[in-house]
Amino acid sequence: MEVFYLVLRNLLARPVRSLLTLLGVLIATASMVLFLSFGEGLRRALFQELSRVGPAIQVVPEGSEGLAFSAYPEITPAQVEALKRAAEALGAQAVIPTLFLARGGLDPQNSFFFQGLPPGVSPDLLYPGLRAKEGRLLPSEGGAVVGAKLAERAGLAVGSPLRLSPQVTLKVEGILEESGGLADNLIFAPLKALQRVLGTENVGAVLVALSPDKKAEEAARALERAVPGLKAQTTGEVMRFAERALRISDLVRFGISLVALAVGGLLVANTVMMSVYERTREFGVMRALGAKRGFIFRLVVLEALFLALLGGVGGLALGGVASQAINLYTQSEVGLALSAVTPRLSLFALLVALSLGLLAGLLPAHHASRIPVVEALGRV
């Protein structure tokens, strides 16, 4: 307890300098937490979305990975027919060709994402649990069904027109109940209508629904062998690909936040080093009274660690508040929470802050413990 009392007394003796150093560490830690929280939020959102998807296998063009948001559909009608025959031989419950079409800009208010469905395929086959709030659930050849969040943002109602191109205009025939997932931000439209807009008969992906007793991995490999040039992905494989991509993005974000962390570390080192210079005589008196070098070393290191810990806890709290503020915006705009301060991120942030304090305190602590007693007592 005596050591901690000395640490606290020294930091409070220079409140302005200690406060400024604390704020530097706090801001550096908060920026790191906020940057990395996007990766955690995307992981959580993606896992929730994949757990809601009905079909167990997604077939995409060879060389593609991840979700079926292809820039241009490449799976030909012949390949779709071959997949249907192969899937039927495997006892698949449904084979659903689909494609995605984006319209609008980067502003969520003006962005529209269409998913094409073949005749007779209802959106709840792809996203189980979907129900119509207004109108119908299954769109007709000239109609579309709109997710709850998108309908609210764009002011769409049953009967509203949707102009996809000069030749293709659809009518809103149903509004879905809010599900808290990706479907809230999609417009489900006839597959042929989207193909007309793109001027192609191809599709972007083929979704294969299996019966519960079938193994998705084995069925995916069988489909790949049956139809060369296509890649069959299970939900687990899509998640593993997304995890690799998110890890890379985490490293990039952490690299950016290292700049702020380095500044915070230098602030701690500067504060502790100045404290060492100002207390040289005090350290000499301690040594003369019998204090060991190790005691002086630990005292200075603890000062740095204490500053870093307080800054880390404050930064974690500030990052959490900023994360919640971002989620309020993204949930109102796109219906998804894209930021999350998880327990593992919190622990990582505190470990980084403590490591920062330890590294910043080692050099001043070494210098303080090596000051000769006679020289220290001679200082004014």
Image (cartoon, helix red, strand yellow):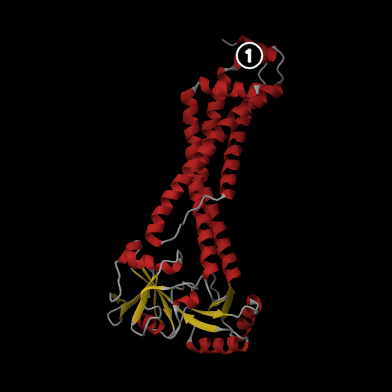
In what quadrant of the picture does the C terminus appear? top right
- Whole-percent x and y of residue 76? 48, 85
Vertical relation: 169 (above or below) 31: below
164 lies left or right of 43: left
Determine whether the residue tagged by mark 1 lies in a helix, strand or loop: helix
Compared to residue 101, the image places residue 196 above or below, namely below
Quick check: 22 above or below 125? above
Image quadrant holding the N terminus, namely top right
- Residue visible at 42% across and 51% down? 326
| Residue 38: percent from left, percent from top | 49, 54
Task: Give me the residue at 67% from left, 14% from top.
Answer: 373
Look at label 1 and name its amino acid: Ala
Q: Quadrant of residue 47?
A: bottom right
Task: Locate residue 86, reporting x and y percent.
Answer: 59, 87
Identify the residue shown where x is 48% and y is 48%: 34
Q: Residue at x 57, y 24 (%)?
A: 8
Task: Residue 141: give x, y in percent of width and height.
Answer: 36, 85
Of the pair 368 and 239, the residue shown nearer to us: 239
User: In the image, is residue 74 above or below residue 33?
Assistant: below
Q: Quadrant of residue 118?
A: bottom left
Q: Which residue is mark 1?
A: 376
Instruction: Evaluate whether residue 3 shows in this view.
Output: yes
Q: Mark 1 Cα within 10 Å, few/some/many (few <14, many 20+)?
A: some
